[in-house]
């Protein structure tokens, strides 16, 4: 039997890792490489597919309801916000991700952004290169000791972030309705509700998936309740933060600064107001990246597909 596997879209220059997994599987796989951007393009490419590999192309209800043979959707990455999980479940389509490939990379990136922003590394570097040798452009800079650092979400990545920032002297709190206080205590983190985390923390690091309940989790209403001078770090998903509310908070000084690996609408366009703030650091959704992480991601994404087509329970099934 020949299985049709469609990759809806990808950013890589080649697909050697995926093709090697398929070759090693013993299955007869017809691998179709597409670069879909719209719902209709996905439908045309994948209507009769047995399996789909997905990056950013939409797999919403309108698309999924057109699929005739699909048995599995495997997504590059941790988040599955491109996929309508309810419809996939109704149609009996297994949905898989790779939740463990970039833990070190994202936690390292979060730590790097935290340290760079807190020590004003970018501003000082730019000043020196422009001919200004003066530490006084950097204040205020504070010690970390006893400052309150909050993680919003308590999955694998924020736990690793906590392990890396703990030696710096922070007092640590966490919010996650699905994780017990006892579990957080194992990491020397005090469990608090979202309101307390936002109102009392000096540093807020976001690590929740993008679902209906977390879209604009940081919004105009609760930004007004933040502690004055708070720093917001987002290496999760851009729409978790309401952009206009963030800008207002930065303008007013309520928010001292932000470091964002993700933004609400990607890529951020030249001239966007967020780019005008020297106290906002932005990287291009690159926290996940290392040579090793990309190889692991692509290999495991393809293996999810192979396992389902072989009649096995995939290693990383969400639905």
Image: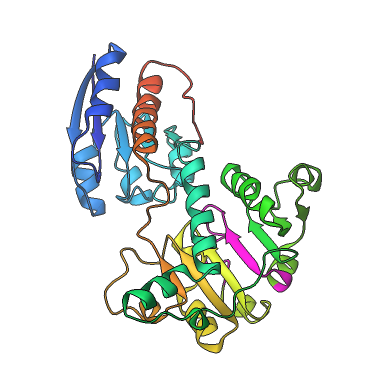
Q: State whether residue 210 appears in this view.
A: no
Judge whether residue 69 is colored magenta: no
Q: Looking at this view, name the residue that lies furthest to the bottom.
A: 252
Picture colour scheme = rainbow
198 lies left or right of 13: right
Q: State whether residue 196 appears in this view.
A: yes
Give coordinates of residue 118: x percent, y percent.
55, 68
Task: Name the residue located 46 percent from the left edge and 79 percent from the top edge.
Answer: 244
Q: Quadrant of residue 76?
A: top left
Q: Quadrant of the N terminus?
A: top left
Q: Quadrant of residue 7?
A: top left
Task: Name the residue located 59 percent from the left edge and 79 percent from the top edge.
Answer: 140
Q: Looking at this view, name the residue that lies furthest to the top.
A: 26
250 lies left or right of 178: left
Q: Nearer the viewer, residue 145 or 163?
A: 145
**Count of numbered marks:** 0
Task: Give the vertical position of 245 relative to 296 (above or below).
Answer: below
Give coordinates of residue 117: x percent, y percent.
51, 68
236 lies left or right of 172: left
Judge whether residue 215 is colored magenta: yes
Give coordinates of residue 72: x percent, y percent.
38, 31
Residue range (magenta): 199-218
Task: Give the vertical position of 158 relative to 150 (above or below).
Answer: above
Q: Looking at this view, name the residue that lies furthest to the right.
A: 182
Q: Nearer the viewer, residue 79 or 258?
A: 258
Task: Give the vertical position of 77 relative to 132 (above or below).
Answer: above
39 lies left or right of 227: left
Give coordinates of residue 228: x percent, y percent.
66, 81
Q: Main secondary structure of the magenta part?
A: loop
Task: Name the residue located 42 percent from the left edge and 51 percent from the top edge.
Answer: 287
Task: Name the residue located 54 percent from the left edge and 68 percent from the top edge.
Answer: 119
């Amino acid at each position: 039997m020949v299985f049709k596997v469609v990759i809806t879209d990808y950013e890589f220059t080649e697909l050697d890792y995926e093709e090697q997994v398929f070759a090693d599987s013993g299955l007869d796989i017809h691998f179709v490489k597409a670069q879909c951007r719209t719902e209709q393009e996905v439908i045309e490419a994948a209507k009769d597919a047995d399996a789909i590999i997905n990056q950013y192309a939409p797999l919403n209800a309108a698309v999924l309801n057109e699929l005739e043979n699909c048995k599995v959707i495997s997504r590059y990455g941790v988040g599955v916000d491109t996929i309508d999980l309810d419809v996939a479940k109704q149609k009996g389509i297994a949905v898989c991700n790779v939740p463990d490939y970039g833990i070190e990379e994202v936690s390292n990136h979060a730590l790097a952004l935290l340290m760079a922003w807190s020590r004003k590394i970018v501003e000082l570097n730019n000043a020196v290169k422009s001919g200004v040798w003066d530490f006084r452009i950097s204040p205020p800079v504070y010690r970390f000791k006893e400052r309150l650092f909050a993680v919003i979400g308590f999955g694998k990545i924020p736990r690793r972030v906590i392990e890396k920032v703990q030696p710096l002297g922070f007092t640590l709190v966490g919010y996650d309705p699905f994780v017990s206080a006892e579990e957080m205590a194992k990491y020397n983190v005090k469990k608090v509700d979202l309101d307390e985390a936002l109102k009392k923390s000096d540093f807020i690091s976001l690590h929740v998936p993008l679902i209906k309940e977390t879209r604009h989790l940081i919004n105009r209403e609760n930004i007004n309740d933040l502690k004055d001078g708070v720093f917001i770090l987002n290496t999760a998903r851009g729409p978790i933060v309401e952009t206009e509310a963030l800008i207002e908070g930065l303008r007013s000084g309520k928010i001292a600064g932000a470091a964002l690996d993700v933004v609400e609408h990607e890529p951020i366009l030249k001239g966007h107001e967020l780019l005008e703030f020297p106290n906002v650091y932005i990287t291009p959704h690159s926290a996940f990246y290392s040579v090793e992480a990309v190889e692991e991601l692509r290999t495991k994404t393809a293996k999810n597909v192979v396992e389902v087509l072989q009649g096995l329970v995939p290693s990383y099934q969400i639905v």
